[in-house]
Amino acid sequence: MLKVLLIGDVVGGPGRKFLRERLPGLKKRLGADAAVVNGENAAGGSGITAAIAQELFDSGADAITLGDHTYGQKQFAAEIPRLEHVVRPANYPREAPGRGWCTVSTSLYRFAVVNLQGRVFMGPCECPFHAADAALAEIPRDIPVLVDFHAEATSEKISLAYHLDGRVAAVAGTHTHVQTSDARVLEKGTAFISDLGMTGPYISSLGREIKPVLQKFISNVPAKFEVAGGPCTIEGALVTIDAAKGSAVSIEAVRERQDAGGVPS
């Protein structure tokens, strides 16, 4: 059995620090062969850089997925082409720098990671359903496939999971920063969860300081949303896969957090 730990959006410096502290032990305790980490908020809450990607790899990530803030840091468009295990949404235009899927090798297994972005309540991009089909046509058929669907609408995430049921090992939603309670294996063997959640400060508004976000909602006056401090959480899901069949056996939501005093719990 292949066990892959999927980690929800890492937010800023606090999220990176907590990932570095917790991910190695979490992988060991859960018996995970590999970890796939969403890093599109890792640089100050918007985007990522090559240096930060290396920091996530050094923390235990085996692949990094992205999303609507892929190019949030201006230098990253020039950096991403050389980052073999960092993937941006496959349904971006073909001219967009980077790749939409990659393969990861462990000591015993090989699997593929596909990144997609939703279109409902999101920025413009190509059809994620067609892009998923195109990616699967390119990926070797003898390896399991895991999909990070970075999307806002739960209905779009669920629909993609059913579209891919039986063809991929897992479809995990990211982007909303709120872990959902619907982790399950669909009828044809695809593990699904609407959203993995967030890795970062949880006394916050999705990882940002509460006060400016609240003021923006109340006044409609734009404000800068700084990454919050305080205790952190690491959230995601562990997917167990029958590597020979490429289908999921189980999926289990995972969460570890510090209490309000910063004490591990």
Image (tube, rainbow, N blue to C red):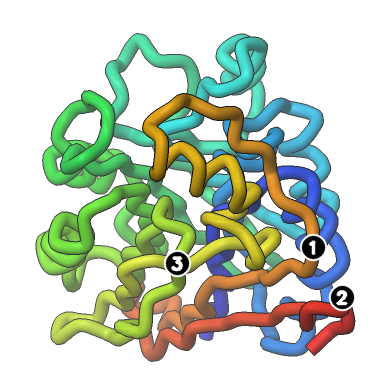
* Quarter of the rendering containing residue 216: top left
Q: Is residue 215 above or below residue 9?
A: above
Mark 1 burial class by Cα count in 10 Å: few <14, some 14-19, many 20+? some
Label 2 CA crowd tier, 10 Å (few <14, some 14–19, many 20+): few
Q: Nearer the viewer, mark 3 or mark 1?
A: 1
Residue 31 in picture, x, y percent from top left: 69, 86
Say which residue appears at 45% left-offset and 66% top-offset. Answer: 178
Mark 3: which secondary structure?
loop
Q: Report which residue position mark 1 lands on.
A: 230
Asked whether residue 63 is in view, the answer is no
Q: CA distance from mark 3 to mark 1?
A: 18 Å
Q: Amino acid at mark 2?
A: Gly
Residue 113 vs 203, above or below: the answer is above
Q: Nearer the viewer, residue 248 or 128?
A: 128
Task: Give me the residue at 40% from left, 43% from top.
Answer: 218
- Residue that mark 3 sits on: 178
The residue that mark 2 highlights is 262
Q: Is residue 261 above or below residue 201?
A: below
Q: Is residue 79 above or below residue 235?
A: above
Q: Secondary structure at mark 2?
A: loop
Task: Please report whichever mark, 3 or 2, sits nearer to the chain's N-terminal start.
Answer: 3
Residue type at mark 3: give it. Val
Q: Earlier in the sequence, mark 3 or mark 1?
A: 3
- Real-space CA distance between mark 3 and mark 2, rounded to the nearest whole angstrom: 20 Å
Eye-nearest disc, 3 or 2: 2
